[in-house]
Amino acid sequence: MVPPWSPLRACAHRVVERRLDFGTQTARRSRALCPPSGSILLGVDLLERLIAVVGEAHVVVGEDAEEFTHDATFMEHPLLAVVRPGSTEEVAAVVGVCHETNTPVVARGSGTSLVGGPVPLAGGVVLSLDRLDHLEIDVANTVAVAGAGVITGQIDEAANAHGLMYPPDPASVGMCSIGGNIACNSGGMRCVKYGVTADYVTGLTVVLADGQVLRLGGKLRKRSSGYRLMQLFIGSEGTLGIVTEATLKLVPLPRFQATAMVGFQTLEEAGAAVARALSRGHFPAAIELMDRNALEMVTHLLPPGFETDLEAVLVVEVDGNNREHVEADLVGMVEVLDGLDDRIAQSPAERARLWEARRRWGEVVRSTPHNYFAEDVAVPIGAIPEMLRRVRKLSEETGIKICTVGHSGDGNLHPSLVFTDEQRPQVSRAAARIFRDALELGGSISAEHGLGALKRDHAELEHGPLAISLMRGLKHLLDPAGILNPHKVLPEGPADDDFLDRQPGWYPDPDRPRRKAETGL
Amino acid sequence: MVPPWSPLRACAHRVVERRLDFGTQTARRSRALCPPSGSILLGVDLLERLIAVVGEAHVVVGEDAEEFTHDATFMEHPLLAVVRPGSTEEVAAVVGVCHETNTPVVARGSGTSLVGGPVPLAGGVVLSLDRLDHLEIDVANTVAVAGAGVITGQIDEAANAHGLMYPPDPASVGMCSIGGNIACNSGGMRCVKYGVTADYVTGLTVVLADGQVLRLGGKLRKRSSGYRLMQLFIGSEGTLGIVTEATLKLVPLPRFQATAMVGFQTLEEAGAAVARALSRGHFPAAIELMDRNALEMVTHLLPPGFETDLEAVLVVEVDGNNREHVEADLVGMVEVLDGLDDRIAQSPAERARLWEARRRWGEVVRSTPHNYFAEDVAVPIGAIPEMLRRVRKLSEETGIKICTVGHSGDGNLHPSLVFTDEQRPQVSRAAARIFRDALELGGSISAEHGLGALKRDHAELEHGPLAISLMRGLKHLLDPAGILNPHKVLPEGPADDDFLDRQPGWYPDPDRPRRKAETGL
């Protein structure tokens, strides 16, 4: 059975008068977003055309398509069909069909998004890229070439076999796809030393909104030639084009790691310690933070006897090519950090043990009987203590438990709001306050997850009207009909305290079983 | 005396029919590029308006403006006035005046460009950003905030005083400005390990073509929120907006370096050695290459007794926080490189000595009685030997001496053509062949210098018509009247063998003294 075409949700655009012409394009874009109602009648014909491109086995409709209606958030939306193309050419042909029929098309990797990124909010076609799973490690050129559907962790693993590494490591690295990582410019723990996804992309194949194939870059590592088109598609969350293949820079694999856990009695001490270590030449491969509320959830995973009366704990890792050097570097760094309690792993087993509290944090949160809502803000690293203080105060004022972990070397914090169904009406307001606090401190509402649908309406608060108007201009240039992943990234409603309350599915249907989606935290 | 308004040079656009609408905008853009001839009459009024913004002391005309008519190439063009604004607000006001009067405006840093980047080919106003020289090192947030006119090396020096480093280090690091580096996404020797300029920019203030001020990003290190507008301006060579201030990520300063020089009998051995070292976990801070022709010019600077019957030499540097570790790492890497002759510096003086041949290379080339033309291509690192072979063959066939140095860990080669005035007619053809060879090998015609005017016409050969049409769309979106740095980046003529011959000034005026401009090579 083909699910009915879903009506477009109402969208409110503010068109602000501006000197450059970006703003006026908004209105055209939002009108173009609305396909003619006759499209409903196109359903069967459209399906036949999609089947003609990818074969019947790769078009999924009805109940089998259910998993493609949602991501790792509470959000979901009916869709017309899931299409699983097997090549860039098939993606181009599918998008061409959508272009001709004015059908929304949403590219999807593994569906681990925490912001509603791949939820098909305008219905239409979900383009699952999982069959684009070819992977080549080109050792002579020190790059990987990966289809959009390749699981990110597999790229690193395959590179490791050749003494090379693909550094970006989102918490969901074992599940998420490289296409999704590129769409969201994903980060991870190692980014403090090695940079984010965007720093590693040297080539992209992109299917444009009309089905044309744009090939950018290649296996070369450096280029200062023309506008940086690749960077325009990276982080655009499938709204400007659909990435089908990427060439990725690899770096030498450090053969040894050394790990320590260091506790701090105050947030200020932890924050000052990070800045101090960096300015004394220590360049950790990870410097992960957990605050008191986060620690309380994983005390059973801390090293035996570890001090628990702490406001913050850092898990620090140093890597390199020589075991003794790496261990000596770590000892030096732990001295500079100067914490209240510290543990330096003396064996691989102890290393794994030290990482357990941080790495299994997401699993612990997902397994609570309560609901959780994961934030992903960034602040300048000097503002981490103040941001953590504000989050703690918010937790005290609202009674919502907020546990924060994060990548402190990047200023990237993940406050997770843990709440009961009764607390649900307050969560939206609390989450919006976290957005505003991060922005007040010179930060961002999204460090590595993207804006998706969830954070969309707060984008102008971060970027200001001129930048948003320019973003709308770019969207109009690349997707004038607005068929690519509608209702994502660009604001459609007010940046207010009710942003979650307005999202479909935030208040769960009591008659349906709760879904617990898999992702990394 | 006010130099006369210079007529626009003829420009030929090929408008190719395309499905998306980028192409048709080209025509509008190129018409808009041509200011009404009445503009000539505006000269005096324009000058008065510019003086009203920045004061008479900061508007330069006539002979005093001569140094602003050229860069470090042979290219030059008359201009109307040089304006030296003292703040972003003054830049905005000057651009506003140019917008209203349809006057071309060219942002300029230190004029070290090797591609004609800041040469005012449409005349008009040159906006010298040298007075935007404020610099702040924010240690707590581990960032620098620099005005566009700050000399790049000063940022690194100031960061060093706080135990921090700004890694990108173009050969002209002591002369070039950070604004120019951002405009060209500059690289340097340390980029193999630390990345290029674009990897360090966390915030930008940009004056748009109509004088509006766009503030992007800030002191935070990570962001996945909305389209990556900053990346659009980086590398756009002042054709999409004018960067007036940047916030730059700093990293821990490694306190020790160890340096070696390693010789190879064949190009293949040198190429294989680089790939082998990277895949064995060695992550050098520099891995610089010189080919036989380059070596011949600096044999007097090589270590005493160093083998000279070599096709290639690598200068390798390792850095870190512990002297012994760094030295041991280097020894291990030199073993893996397995060259015919190698020298490991045993003292700071020996380190300096090993660097001399490479670092003073540019000086030696500039001081020859001959002319030189510096190329800047990139190829995938596995293709370095083949690229060097082709360059050598070209040198043999044409009789033009071509000496190549480069950043081999990035695949970035700088073949310098050294020639007499009699050979000048053949240089354009040889340089065009180097472009084509790099592209055939999957490379780029510009790794770190930008396209400017010199390489503009070969851009479509590299990027293809679809990408160029999208670039034209971006240009039209951001600068519909085409007043920002006209005749740069986007092709205006055929990608042929005569591209140099067509450039004004390539054949020097025998009645004028030759100019030798300062830059890094």
Image (cartoon, coloured by chain):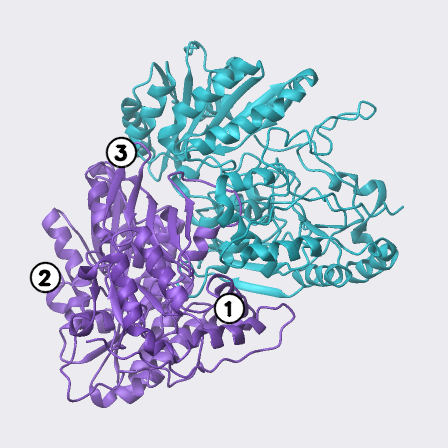
Chain colours: A purple, B cyan
Numbered disc 1: secondary structure: helix
Residue type indicated by callout 1: Arg
Q: Which subunit holds the residue at mark 1? A: A
Q: CA distance from mark 3 to mark 1?
A: 43 Å
Mark 2 or mark 1: whose residue is earlier in sequence? 2
Toward which corner of the image does residue B71 lie, by quadrant? top right
Judge left or right: residue B159 versus residue A406: right
Looking at the rendered image, the disc whose residue lies closer to the viewer, 3 or 1, is: 1
- Residue beneath label 2, please? A304
Label 2 crowd bin: few (<14), some (14–19), many (20+), radius 10 Å: few
Label 3 crowd bin: few (<14), some (14–19), many (20+), radius 10 Å: many
Residue type indicated by callout 3: Ser
Toward which corner of the image does residue B31 lie, by quadrant? bottom right
- Residue beneath label 3, please? B279
- Residue beneath label 1, please? A472
The verdict on a common chain for dots 3 and 2 is no
Q: CA distance from mark 2 to mark 1?
A: 54 Å
Q: Which subunit holds the residue at mark 3? A: B
Judge left or right: residue A294 versus residue B245: left
Judge left or right: residue B127 versus residue B179: right
Residue type indicated by callout 2: Pro
Q: Position of residue B178 (x, y in %)?
A: 57, 47
Q: In the figure, B215 relative to A38: above or below?
A: above
Q: Position of residue B445 (x, y in %)?
A: 51, 35
Q: Position of residue B189 (x, y in %)?
A: 46, 34
